[in-house]
Image: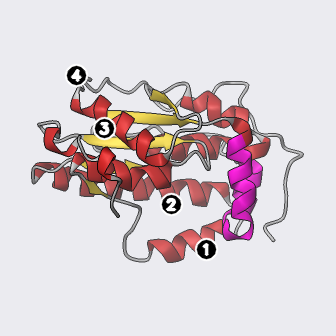
Amino acid sequence: MHTDPQHRRAISTVPWPPRFVVLDGLRSSGKTTVAPLLAELLGAELIAPQGPGFDVLRRHTDTTTNVNARLHLWMSENYARSDRARRILESGRSVVTESYFHRTLATHAATGARNLPTVDWQTALFPHATYFLRVNPTIRLARMAARGRADRTGYWSRLEEANLHLTEAVYEGFDLIPVDIGSARAGDIAQRIADLETAATHIPRQPTGSPLPDAAQPDPTHREDSK
């Protein structure tokens, strides 16, 4: 994938040493669109969830209503992705990914997980920077509506939307860098983040854990079937 010419100037100033950069945000905030553009601008490798049998397991858990099975599948995937990112960094290249541990914990708090696991940051690779894409709620909902039947995780999406305050409460417990995207094009958003990266002086902070506020309990009356 190629960006417009005006969105190429960050490549010549790739930050060194290589960095591990994560894009996060609510569903339909633009993470999947922006991530490859950002990776190209930084000369970084884009990594996505994968692994032997992962797609089969993901499809299976997405068609069930077992939140713990889904939560721990994604936690395991995040640890595996962390190992891949570490190997790439050791080779001298930066890494871009989206929806890392932060999103796994935030979304599953909203979809019914009562006890969120603590991320073992002694094992998992802690990002140098995690950028949180903030989009106007009306725009985000319009994007979701446009996806319609293409969203194979519809049950989980509806459940999270009904308890979105829980997702947001968990996100607030992490040290994320907000990026207000407004009506900007994906290429412009990627360039804005690339500019932040090329000037980065951020030192990863020690994570504070996996917060789930005492009052953050899903609405037990909201349960839809998975059809």
Along the line of sight, which residue is nearer the eye, 110 or 158? Answer: 158
Instruction: Give the left or right position of residue 68, taking residue 146 as reference.
Output: left
49 is higher (above) or lower (below) than 42:
below
Q: Secondary structure at mark 3?
A: helix
Q: Which residue is mark 3?
A: 194
Looking at the image, can residue 90 be seen? yes
Q: Which region is colored magenta? A: 139-160
Distance, label 1 to label 4, CA atoms, is 42 Å
Q: What is the three-letter code of the residue carrying label 3?
A: Ala
Q: Secondary structure at mark 1?
A: helix
Residue depicted at x 49% and y 73%: 55
Q: Earlier in the sequence, mark 2 or mark 1?
A: 1
Earlier in the chain: of badge 4 and badge 2, it is: 2
- Residue 136's mark? none
Q: Which mark is residue 73?
A: 2
Q: Nearer the viewer, residue 11 or 178?
A: 11
Q: Is residue 127 visible?
A: no
Q: Nearer the viewer, mark 2 or mark 3?
A: 3
Q: Which residue is mark 1?
A: 60
Real-space CA distance between mark 2 and mark 1, rounded to the nearest whole angstrom: 11 Å
